[in-house]
Amino acid sequence: MSQATRLAHHIERTVTGPMWHGPALADVLDGVTRDRALAHPLLGAHSIWEIVLHITVWCDIARLRVQGQATEDPTPEQDWPPVPAACAEDWPIAVERLHESHRRLAADVLQLTDAQLDAKVPGLGYAVGVMLSGIVEHGTYHGGQIALLRRAGGQP
């Protein structure tokens, strides 16, 4: 299996699973209602919905960088976008965008050569492959936060 194929599978499995460490993002988001996604059960912590938007933002940034578009780091408002004035239909859309962003990134990664994975991200000091591994780590880290927020809100 090529390095690109392995990374693409890891990126997709971050959302869909299976993951060796435990639940993937889809698993920790399963059964989360709009109200639970909006809740702030821990003082000072982001909501589940805010975390989903944040994970999606960084997956989209990585995709732009893979496509060769030099992107600046996001502003704080871009990094943690506000939850829209939420109606019930918006929550499943946010979750689907999370899935779609990872699918699209994985599809782009499949087209990369080892040389492209080893090349530096334009304007940054690390390789494309390191950035892509970071997307998996980022999703996994925030998946753990979502699991803790579920428990803090009384949901297993």
Image (spheres, grey):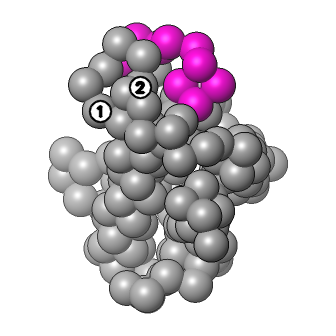
Measured as percent of width and height from the top left, residue 86 is found at 66, 38
Q: Are the residues at dot 2 and dot 1 in contact (C-beta closer than 8 Å)?
A: yes
* Marks 2 and 1, the one that precedes in the sequence: 2
Measured as percent of width and height from the top left, residue 60 is found at 59, 33
Residue furthest left as drawn: 43
Region of the chain picked out in magenta, as a range: 65-76
For label 1, the SS is loop
Quadrant of residue 10 in the image?
Answer: bottom right
Main SS class of the magenta portion in the image: loop
Measured as percent of width and height from the top left, residue 116 is found at 53, 36
Q: Residue at x 29, y 33 (%)?
A: 126
Q: Residue at x 39, y 65 (%)?
A: 140
- Which residue is identified by label 1? 126
Amino acid, disc 2: Val
- Which residue is identified by label 2? 121
Residue 2 visible in the snapshot: yes
Residue furthest front as drawn: 115
Q: Residue at x 72, y 44 (%)?
A: 111
The quarter in which the C terminus is drawn is: bottom left
The quarter in which the N terminus is drawn is: bottom right
